[in-house]
Image (cartoon, helix red, strand yellow):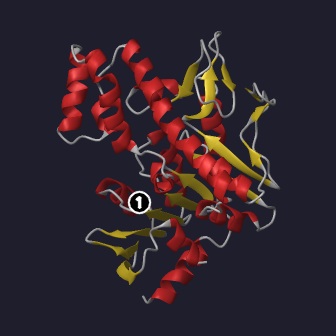
Amino acid sequence: MNKNDIFLLVQKALNSPPLILVGTGGTIPYGISGMQKLANWLLRKLNSKYDGNPKWKEFDKRLKNGLDLESALTDLNMPDTIIDDIVMATWQLVSGDDLQLFETWLENDNKPTLGKIVNKFYQANPQCVNIITTNYDRLIEYSCDQFFLPVNLFFEGEFIKRMRKTAKPACASMVNILKVHGSLDWYYDKDGQVVSIPMRKEIPYGFKPAIVTPGMGKYKRVLESPFRDILHIADELIEKAGNYLCIGYGFNDSQIQTNIISGIRTGKPIVVVTMEISKSALQLIQQNSENYIVIHAVKENLDRTEIITPQGREELNGQFWTQDGFYTIF
């Protein structure tokens, strides 16, 4: 296939607004720390406090041996005190990145490409885009604001928000954003209930961040409200979607991707845009779909893009694996 054929293939796969999944790879280009930076941050922040704890020592050893953060935390059964500190430290790192980005965009009136992509799909009737993200940051929300797109985060109130008792996605004139692992704005209050308090520079006294950090504990946490409710809505939207667009999503979260896999098995198109796709993720897609397009960087030359489809592999000059490059396809 030549470049025009590939572009037409992508356009056909996304000829109706897709359900969009955004992972950490979708926000790293904007300055939000990814898993590797988070792992290094946790070691710097907490090593001196827990260097005598055998569980922490094993965690430290796993990271230094090259394991990713998710794998390093798996099966360790960390004490609650360490888990709480991991959550606090994670919030501090991501929040710092997020607020710095927000200030920069305010000063420069930035029009982020992620917002352009969402806005492009929003223009189709009935002007509804559904986005699922595993990220805590507010980059998607900021991006929508820059393009005057209405956003539904499923909470109500002004400054101390609570999840709507009858939370459901809007079907028109709305961008529904489902943050399945929580948000920088979410906190457990003194009664253990989750509230949303926007744009805090510090964690409110007596509150704890309501975010799901990597590791086995996340599977227990997402069974609690409001994570359970958000995940239920996400499952419904995944099932109803006619196609999928994954931006920087790594396919390492079984709670989300199980229904995605069920969808692509029925022939629903899936387009994956990422800097690098793991062998396991690619295998998962190829084993379950006959209608996929994977767009990722050529490892030896980031100025080239490899396109993987059921018909084979093609290389193109240009960074079409980036959000800027991907947007030019349309």
> Residue 173, percent across and down?
82, 56
**Circle 1: element type:** helix
Q: Is residue 124 above or below residue 237?
A: below
According to the picture, the residue beneath numbered tag 1 turns out to be: 285
Residue furthest to the top? 191
Q: Residue at x 58, y 25 (%)?
A: 202
Residue 73 falls in image quadrant: top left
- Quarter of the image that includes the C terminus: bottom right
Identify the image quadrant of residue 207.
Answer: top right
The percent position of residue 48, horizontal first and vertical second, equals 27, 19
Horizontal side of residue 152 vs 250, given as left or right: right
Residue placed furthest toward the front = 107
* Image side of residue 159 versus residue 316, left or right: right
- 167 left or right of 252 in image: right
Task: Report crowding for label 1: few under 14, some 14 to 19, many 20 or more residues within 10 A (C-alpha).
Answer: many
Residue 38: percent from left, percent from top? 38, 38
Which of 315/319 is in front? Answer: 319
Residue positioned 48% across, 46% down in the render: 258
